[in-house]
Amino acid sequence: MRKVRVGSVVGTRMDKTAVVELVWKQRHRVYRKQMRRVTRFYVHDPEEQCQIGDMVRIQETRPISRTKHWRLLNILSRREVADIRPIELEGDSIIETSEDPSVASDSAIAVAQESGDYNEDEDA
């Protein structure tokens, strides 16, 4: 009898391999608080049909490679994962800095004059 587990796919970057994560809870022996434990399995996926976020059933098998000892039985459910892109910055919110300290101080003085916090008598 071979072990069978159900987990979610968290990585598919390797060829014919998926990383499946199994989350389980265990009670601390002294403090009796529930601890969240995470186990990762490297799963043989010969047709590369797994996608990130899928719930899959895996089965223990002979060693396929140094870290791969599980194979994919079936995909239980598919899950849509949002494609995250970096936020584009607006052009006026970018502040350019200069290596020359006199230019940087001139721009700081201009900002202070606009806000009313700068007095020319204090600078001299």
Image (cartoon, rainbow, N blue to C red):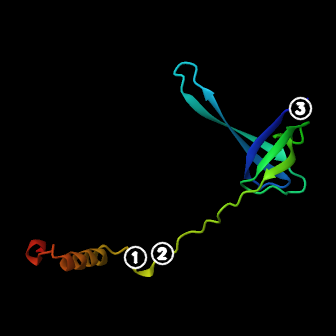
The Cα–Cα distance between marks 3 and 2, rounded to whole angstroms, is 53 Å
81 or 60, nearer to the observer: 81
What type is the residue that disc 3 sits on? Arg
Q: Nearer the viewer, mark 1 or mark 3?
A: 3
Per the rendering, the mark at residue 2 is 3
120 or 93, nearer to the observer: 93
Instruction: Report the residue at 26% width, 74% height from top.
Output: 108
Residue 78: x %, y % from top left: 76, 56
Task: State the residue lying farthest toward the front.
Answer: 77
Q: Nearer the viewer, mark 3 or mark 2?
A: 3
Per the rendering, the mark at residue 118 is none
Circle 1 packing at 10 Å, graded few (<14), some (14-19), many (20+), is: few
Per the rendering, the mark at residue 93 is 1
- In the displayed structure, 67 sits above or below 110; it is above
What type is the residue that disc 1 sits on? Ser
**Lateral position of residue 122 relative to residue 105, left or right:** left
* SS state under label 3: loop
Circle 2 packing at 10 Å, graded few (<14), some (14-19), many (20+), is: few
Instruction: Report the residue at 48% width, 75% height from top.
Output: 89
